Image (cartoon, grey):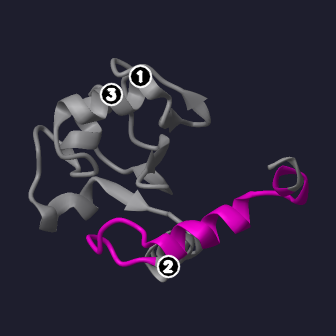
């Protein structure tokens, strides 16, 4: 089975087109090699997939005939992704929401001044 079809069949990516695009961008590796979407996968292959800033590690156990239900996915793959990958993603989510809540609007004048002070260096201030 093709790698893009396999990733779609075991529900790692929502559409087959998304799986193809991930392969073309280099986000998919099989046994450490960057692969094209048409690369066949076999039981025993180890797939590395970068999705949403998480590096998933998947071991192919069997090849499904077509897309499978969510409850049956574990028959066809073994997820060996380390827990640290998910923890770093969670920390990134906290970092994004720390300063401003999403949808609050434009920064206030004070916020813009604070950002300018943070990004400007002492030399830039002397030039003005």
Residue toward you, 53 or 112: 112
Estimate the spatial distance between the alpha carbons at disc 3 and disc 1, rounded to whole Å.
5 Å
- Whether the magenta-drawn stretch holds residue 116 is answered as yes
Q: Which residues are magenta?
A: 100-125
Residues at marks 1 and 2, CA–CA distance in whole angstroms? 35 Å
Nearer the N terminus, badge 1 or badge 2?
A: 1
Bin the neighbour count of mark 3 within 10 Å (Cα to Cα): few under 14, some 14-19, many 20 and up: some
The residue to which callout 3 is attached is 21
Question: Between residues 39 and 98, which one lies in front from this camera angle?
Answer: 98
Residue, disc 1? 24
Element assignment for label 2: helix
Check disc 1: other Cα within 10 Å, few if <14, some if 14-19, many if 20+.
some
Residue at the limit of the structure toward the front, as seen here: 128
* Residue under the point 20% across and 29% down: 17
Q: Earlier in the sequence, mark 3 or mark 2?
A: 3
Does 111 sit left or right of 43 as displayed?
A: right
Q: Nearer the viewer, residue 100 or 8?
A: 100
CB atoms at circles 3 and 1 under 8 Å apart? yes
Is mark 3 in CB contact (under 8 Å) with mark 2?
Answer: no
Residue 61, above or below 99: above
Whether residue 48 sits left or right of residue 126 in the image: it is: left
Q: Which residue is mark 2?
A: 99
């Amino acid at each position: 089975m093709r790698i893009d079809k396999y990733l779609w069949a075991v529900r790692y990516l929502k559409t087959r087109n998304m799986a193809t695009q991930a392969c073309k961008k280099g986000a998919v590796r099989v046994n450490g090699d960057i692969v094209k979407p048409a690369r066949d996968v076999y039981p025993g292959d180890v797939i590395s997939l970068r999705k949403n800033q998480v590096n998933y590690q998947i071991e192919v156990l069997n090849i499904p005939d077509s897309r499978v239900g969510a409850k049956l996915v574990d028959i066809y793959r073994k997820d060996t992704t380390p827990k640290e990958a998910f923890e770093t993603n969670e920390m990134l989510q906290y970092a994004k929401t720390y300063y401003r809540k999403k949808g609050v609007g434009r920064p206030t004048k004070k916020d813009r001044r604070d950002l300018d002070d943070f990004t400007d260096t002492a030399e830039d201030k002397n030039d003005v």
